[in-house]
Amino acid sequence: MTSALLGPWAGKMINIHPSLLPLYRGTNTHERALADGAKVHGCSVHYVTSELDGGPIIAQAEVPVLPGDTPETLSARVLTEEHKLYPKALAIVANQLT
């Protein structure tokens, strides 16, 4: 995201990303993890900065990469963890505001 677009929201927006950042920034994270032979994959919630998927990490969750995984099966397990992780990350952020 460009600094001009980020503007007043710098350090205030959060994003969920389907990898254990700083690994696999950008797209096609599941395919890339499988191609690399990763044993663990997951998701991250981070603050949005002008650097693609480069903001400070708030929380992460891991999933195992299983034999025979496809991008679709791995994505499904990561998505389950994303649904759990995002509310936890929101609570962390909210607690920092008080």
Image: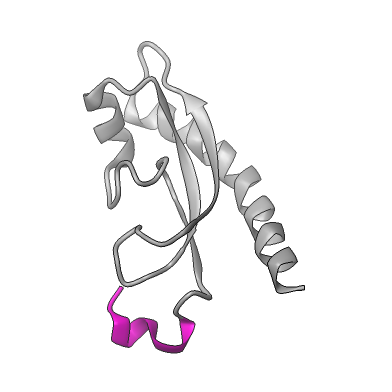
Of the 4 image quadrants, the one containing the C terminus is: bottom right
Q: Which residue is found at the position 47% from the left and 82% from the top?
A: 9
Q: Residue furthest right?
A: 98
Majority SS type along the magenta span = helix
**Residue 1 at what x, y percent from top left?**
31, 73
Q: Is residue 81 left or right of residue 70?
A: right
- The image shows residue 36, relative to residue 98, as above or below, that is above
**Residue 16 at what x, y percent from top left?**
48, 55
Q: Which residue is found at the position 71% from the left and 73% from the top?
A: 97
Q: Which residue is found at the position 23% from the left and 25% from the top?
A: 36
Q: Is residue 25 left or right of residue 10?
A: left
- The image shows residue 10, relative to residue 34, as above or below, that is below
Corner quadrant of residue 30: top left
Q: Is residue 43 left or right of residue 59?
A: left
**Residue 89 at what x, y percent from top left?**
63, 55
Tell how many labels.
Answer: 0
Q: Does the magenta stretch include residue 6?
A: yes
What is the magenta range? 1-9
Corner quadrant of residue 32: top left
- The image shows residue 43, relative to residue 88, as above or below, that is above
**Residue 57 at what x, y percent from top left?**
49, 54
Q: Which residue is found at the position 27% from the left and 78% from the top?
A: 2
